[in-house]
Amino acid sequence: MEELQVYAFKYQRAESVTSAAAALSTDDAAKVLSGGMTLLPSMKHRLIAPTVLIDLARLPDLIGVREQADHWWVGSATRHQDVAAHVGLQKAMPGLAQLAGLIGDPQVRARGTLGGSLANNDPSADYPAAALALQADIVTERRSIAADDFFLGMFATALQPDEIITGVRFRTALRSAYAKFKHPASGYAMAGVFVAQYPSAGLDRGGWRVAVTGVANGVFRWQEAEQALAKGTTTPALQRDDVIDDVHAPAAYRTHLAMQMLAQACQAF
């Protein structure tokens, strides 16, 4: 029988975001732990071997949902189930609440957090689509990063190695909806489309923003769909060079799913 090797690491419960950031800056192999839905499986499969896990899950400043002027603030350690169940969000931003309720399964929603999802930027994760469609600002302990500048490709973001997401500002939309075709085993999006409408004044494409996840090598805005919605015309077929083509679905099928999910999201308005 093969002996299972357990990698030693230290566990540290952060007393503040400042102390957590300081610990990250002094150890390149340290990792932040919040929900752990991506981090812990990665450790289990020996993809990473952190020296220290810095737990942010109990920092009160990172937890909660609240309305502020023209946006909604969601703390980075807020669990998916709490976003899904928030009555204010359900009324004002139904697409965001709906998206959170579609993530994984009840166990994942009870542990997973917004900040971890965005920081990992899995190409099939749900929250990146919401951030991009809802003109979000991803806020860290040192700066604010527009969602349009935050996602840099598969598992890549604009975050520095020792930078910690503290929360996200989602701009309040006139209407929003999310439709998703789940992978039957993982619950990840094989195609997820988030549609949001804003007042058209000062915005391109008539105030419409459409973001797609699960289809390509990273979340992206579907500009042709935005233009079609603004004009009230039929959306042309999605055309990209980086559509995922794997054992789960060929590229043509994912493209078809994106068209169907766009239609479903718009029907929810």
Image: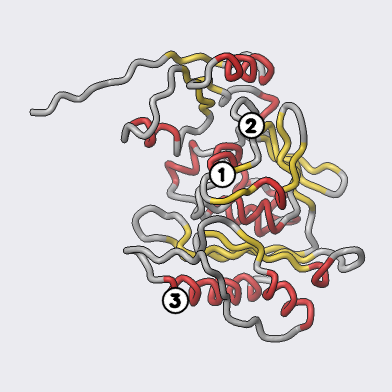
- Element at label 2: loop
Residue 66 percent across, percent down from the top left: 76, 40
CB-based contact (under 8 Å), mark 1 and mark 2: no
Q: Amino acid at mark 2?
A: Gln
Instruction: Give the residue at mark 1.
Output: 156
Instruction: Give the residue at mark 2.
Output: 160
At horizontal 32% and vertical 63% (from top left) the residue drawn is 247
Please identify the quadrant where the C terminus is shown: bottom right
Judged from this view, the residue extending furthest toward the right is 201
Could you give the CA–CA distance between mark 3 and mark 1, rounded to whole angstroms?
25 Å
**Residue in front for this viewpoint, 16 or 47:** 47
Q: Amino acid at mark 1?
A: Ala
Could you give the CA–CA distance between mark 1 and mark 2, rounded to whole angstroms?
11 Å
Relative to 84, residue 95 above or below: below
Residue 236 percent across, percent down from the top left: 63, 82
Drawn side of residue 171 relative to residue 236, left or right: right
Could you give the CA–CA distance between mark 3 and mark 2, rounded to whole angstroms?
36 Å
Instruction: Give the residue at mark 3.
Output: 252
